Amino acid sequence: MKKTPVVVIVGPTAVGKTKTGIELAKAFDGEIVSGDSVQVYRGMDIGSAKVTKEEAEGIPHHLIDICDPDDAMSVAAFQQLARAAIDDIYARGKLPIIVGGTGLYIRSILYDYEFVERPVDEELRAELERMAEVEGREAIHQRLAKLDPERAATIHPNNVRRVVRALEVAMQGDTQTTDSAPSEHYDYRLFVLHADRELLYDRINQRVDAMMEAGLVEEVERLIAEGYRDTQAMRAIGYKEIIPYVEGDISEERATDLLKQHTRQFAKRQLTWFRHQFDGIWVDMGRKSFELSYKNIYDDVEGFFRKFRLF
C-alpha cells in the first residue's frame, strides 16, 4: 500500500510554527491541517493565536472554526476529521502539512490510536440512579461537582440522566485508548521547533501583550455574553485567565501576568511532552534567523518527499 506523505510541524507556543508551516505550504504546494485543540472553536480567535487571513497568505487551513465553544471535541473525533482532511489534500495532489502544539491530537493522527467505549456498568448506574432518588437531584449534582467541577458547571441539576452519566465517566472513565505503533497509512517527516528558554519566554510575553492590544478582553466578553462562560473550551489558557478580570475579580495587570505565567509553564510542558512522545528532527528557531532555520527544514522536506513525485 502506498503511504501518504505528511510533513508535521510541532513545538511550543510562540516558537514560529504558523509561519514555518505557511512557508512550507507555499514552497511545496501544500495545505495545512491545524493540530490545535482550541482553534477548532469558532469565535475563539485571539486567545488561541488563530492564523489570520493575512497571515495565511492564501494557504488553505483545515480543522479551524469547525465547531462552537459548547460543542464536544474529543481526541477520537479529531483523529477522524484530521485523517479525512489529510486524505483529501493528498488526493488533490497537494502536500498535507500538520501544524500545531496539541501533542495528543497530533499523535492520534500519526499513531494507531483506537478508541473503545467502556461497557456500561449496569450496577454502578443503578446505584447512582437510586442515590439520585433518595438524596435528591441537588445532592447527586454536588457529588459530581466534587469529582468533576468543570463538567458539573455545564449540566443543570434537574437533568438527572446527564448528571448520572457524567458521574459514571468521572468514576470510571469514558474511553480506553491504545496506540501500538506509527500508522501504516502515513510516511511522515516530523520537525520539533524549539528555542532558547529565555528567548522563547520573551516571545511569549510579547505575544500576550499583543493579544491584549488586539482585543482579547473584548473577545472573552463576547463569548461570555453568548453563553459560553462555563464551557470546557473557555478553560483553555488564554481565556480562563481573562474571565476573572472581566467579572471584576482581579485587575487587568494581574490577568495579563497570569496569562504570561501559565503560557510559559504550558510551553515548558509541551517541550517535555514532545521530547518523550515524538521521534523527530529538532530545529533551533532561536539564535539563528528564521530564514536560516527554515532553510534546514526546506532542504530536508525537499529531499524526503521527492520520491513521492509531488514536485
Image: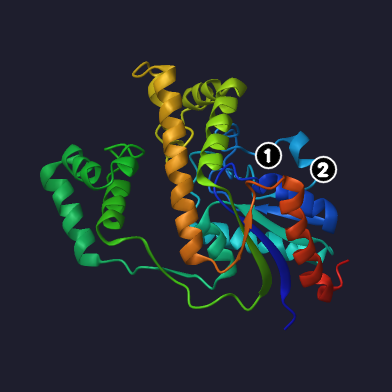
* Residue closer to the observer: 155 or 24: 24
Residue 268 seen in the current view = yes
Q: Which residue is mark 1?
A: 51
Vertical placement of residue 245 versus 12, above or below: above
Lateral position of residue 190 relative to residue 151, left or right = right
Q: Quadrant of the N terminus?
A: bottom right
Give percent across and percent down for residue 116.
Answer: 42, 70
Lateral position of residue 138 relative to residue 34, left or right = left
Residue 138 image label: none
Element assignment for label 1 = loop
Q: Which residue is mark 2?
A: 58
* Residue closer to the observer: 167 or 200: 200
Q: Quadrant of the C terminus?
A: bottom right
Lateral position of residue 188 relative to residue 308, left or right = left
In the rendered structure, which disc, 1 or 2, sits on the residue that comes first in sequence?
Answer: 1
Element assignment for label 2 = loop
Give percent across and percent down for residue 88.
Answer: 75, 62
**Mark 1: few/some/many CA within 10 Å (<14, 14-19, 20+):** some
Residue at the image position 55 percent from the left and 23 percent from the top:
212
Residue 236 seen in the current view = no
